Amino acid sequence: MGVADIVENSQLIIMPVALVEQNWFRWAISLILGFPLIMIILNEIIVRLRQEEKPLIATIIIFRNLVFPLVALLFLFTRVLEIPEETTIIRLVKTLVWIGMIHAMLSAFKVLIFDQAVSGSWQERVPDLLLDLIRFFLVACITAVILSTVWKIDLGALLTAFGVGSLVIGLALQDTLKNLFSGILLLFERPFALGDWLQVGETIGKVIK
């Protein structure tokens, strides 16, 4: 074997080693091996939860169908393809990841706190309207975080305008808001139940809903 053959064979050995040392290559191998493994594990968990008829299955399906594919896509773009994080496509993917996480967290919160509530507990007495208001508030807060961290938007002026607008709306709708929150408190306390007869002034009626 000549010197040229030895040099050629040594290059064949060195090149794969140099390739393995590349950061993008390690991320590519991790995605190729890790993503299918995680999907298989999630599928097994979903099958088990479906057999046991657990309400948490909806949250796991969101993670399988939405969150983990988007996270894998984000790693593919940023770690393997090494696309700069300031580009529009990366910001869009990050926004979708945040949306998926919000959807999954709200679903898990509702299942763990309210869907499995014991009869007669305070969770059972919480009205759906209050849950919708809490959900809207959380989504608004996380949306502000996304706009600030992902899209680098200055929210100072927007928050000032929103605060002034809320003050004006609150002053203009005092009676309406008072009745709204009084109704929420009434639904939360549940001083009467379905089938009860109530008298308000000269009006007598039966509670049917």
Image (spheres, rainbow, N blue to C red):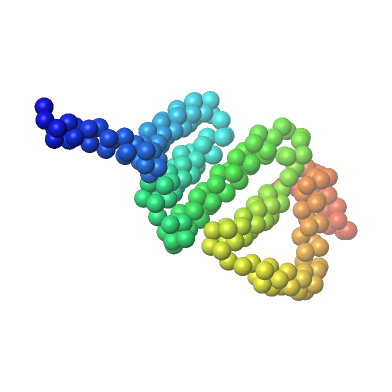
Which residue is at a point 71% across and 51% down the rendered structure image?
130
> Closer to the camera, 168 or 92?
92
Q: Position of residue 132 (x, y in %)?
A: 66, 53
Picture coordinates of residue 131 (x, y %)? 68, 49
Q: Is residue 116 visible?
A: yes
Q: Residue furthest left?
A: 1
Residue at point 67% right, 39% down?
A: 114
56 relative position to 188: left or right: left
Is 75 on the left or on the right of 15, as rendered? Answer: right
Q: In the image, residue 109 lies at what x, y percent? A: 64, 41
Image point (79%, 61%), residue name: 179
Residue 118, quarter of the rendered image: top right
Q: In front: 206, or 91?
A: 91
Is residue 136 visible to us here? no
Residue at the far front: name it: 3
Residue 204, compared with residue 55, is above or below; it is: below
> Quick one: 19 or 50, which is closer to the camera?
19
Camera-side residue of 27 and 168: 27
Above or below residue 172? Residue 193 is above
Q: Quadrant of the N terminus?
A: top left
**39 up-or-down from 92: above or below:** above
Answer left or right for 139 relative to 24: right
Q: In this image, 153 relative to 67: left or right?
A: right
**Coordinates of residue 153 in the picture (x, y in percent):** 58, 66
